[in-house]
Image (cartoon, helix red, strand yellow):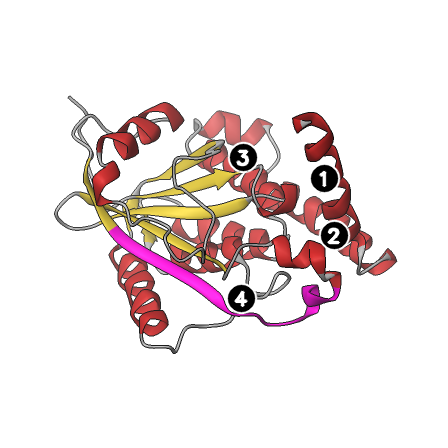
């Protein structure tokens, strides 16, 4: 049987085909009773609006927020398959998308995950407060560049306490937030998690995650400096290729 020494952990969920091919980030956060909660933050109606009107990339738009309890996972959530099995077993507890405000089913196109050990009680509390604010019409705005799904999720994780190397993880999350694109940030945080969970001698041999993230930061900054519309141009290309493959 799976034994979780902390019982208040968190999981970064990555959907690499969502968000016009740039990815979407959501979270699973565990409460004090061992139950897992799903958190979602995104643009209301999805990101297709940016394809229809690229100049929205600079604007704040209405957001859509979810934070709901799914249940406990007695066998643990150790990989993507176990997460999907857990969600499928608890399908009845997931809200149905009847209003069209989000196209994401937590089980669709899940491409990867990162398991973080620690105490993320404060992260869950902040996520639920966001849901309550949204329900009361006071939800924060979504911005593709400065307040997107990945950046909000990273900020929530930073409110928790990692089981070890807490400062290093939080520094990496701050760096990842500047990368803008969820898929790139996921790659950086995956390396960060592997690094901090590796033996001390491996940490001496391999470069620190902060150096790797800094290189990604420089690449993103250079891209935006050359063309602020580069992200939208790539999104349009991704959509074209996706349609071609699907046809």
Which residue range is magenta in the image? 55-68
Quick one: label 1 or label 2, which is nearer the N terminus?
Answer: 2
- Residue at the location (33% across, 61% down)? 127
Q: Residues within 10 Å of mark 2 (few under 14, many from 20)?
A: many
Q: What is the x, y in percent for residue 84?
A: 34, 29
Q: What is the x, y in percent for residue 193?
A: 46, 37
Q: Give the mark toward the camera: 3 or 2.
A: 2
As measured in the structure, the alpha-carbon distance from the residue carrying label 3 to the one carrying label 2 is: 24 Å
Q: What is the x, y in percent for residue 190?
A: 51, 36
The residue to which callout 3 is attached is 191
- Which quadrant holds the C terminus? top right
The residue to which callout 2 is attached is 231
Give the SS element for disc 3: helix
Quick one: label 4 or label 3, which is nearer the N terminus?
Answer: 4
Number of numbered discs overlaid on the protein picture: 4
Question: Of 32 and 28, which appears nearest the observer?
Answer: 28
Label number found at residue 238: 1
Give the SS element for disc 4: loop
């Amino acid at each position: 049987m799976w034994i979780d020494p902390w019982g208040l952990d968190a999981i970064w969920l990555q959907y690499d085909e969502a968000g016009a091919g740039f990815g979407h980030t959501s979270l699973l956060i565990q409460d004090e009773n061992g139950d897992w909660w799903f958190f979602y933050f995104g643009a209301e109606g999805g990101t297709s609006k940016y394809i229809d009107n690229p100049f929205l990339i600079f604007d704040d738009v209405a957001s859509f927020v979810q934070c709901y309890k799914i249940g406990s996972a007695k066998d643990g959530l150790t990989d993507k398959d176990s997460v999907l099995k857990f969600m499928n077993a608890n399908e009845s507890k997931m809200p149905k998308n009847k209003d069209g405000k989000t196209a994401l089913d937590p089980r669709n196109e899940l491409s990867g995950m990162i398991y973080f050990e620690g105490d993320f009680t404060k992260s869950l509390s902040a996520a639920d407060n966001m849901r309550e604010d949204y329900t009361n019409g006071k939800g924060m705005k979504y911005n593709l560049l400065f307040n997107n799904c990945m950046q909000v999720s990273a900020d929530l994780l930073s409110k928790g306490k990692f089981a070890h190397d807490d400062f290093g993880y939080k520094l990496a999350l701050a760096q990842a937030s500047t990368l803008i694109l969820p898929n790139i940030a996921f790659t950086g945080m995956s390396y960060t998690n592997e690094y901090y969970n590796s033996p001390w001698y491996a940490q001496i041999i391999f470069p620190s995650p902060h150096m790797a993230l800094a290189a990604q930061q420089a690449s993103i900054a250079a891209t935006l400096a050359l063309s602020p519309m580069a992200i939208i141009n790539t999104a349009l290309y991704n959509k074209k290729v996706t349609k071609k493959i699907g046809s």
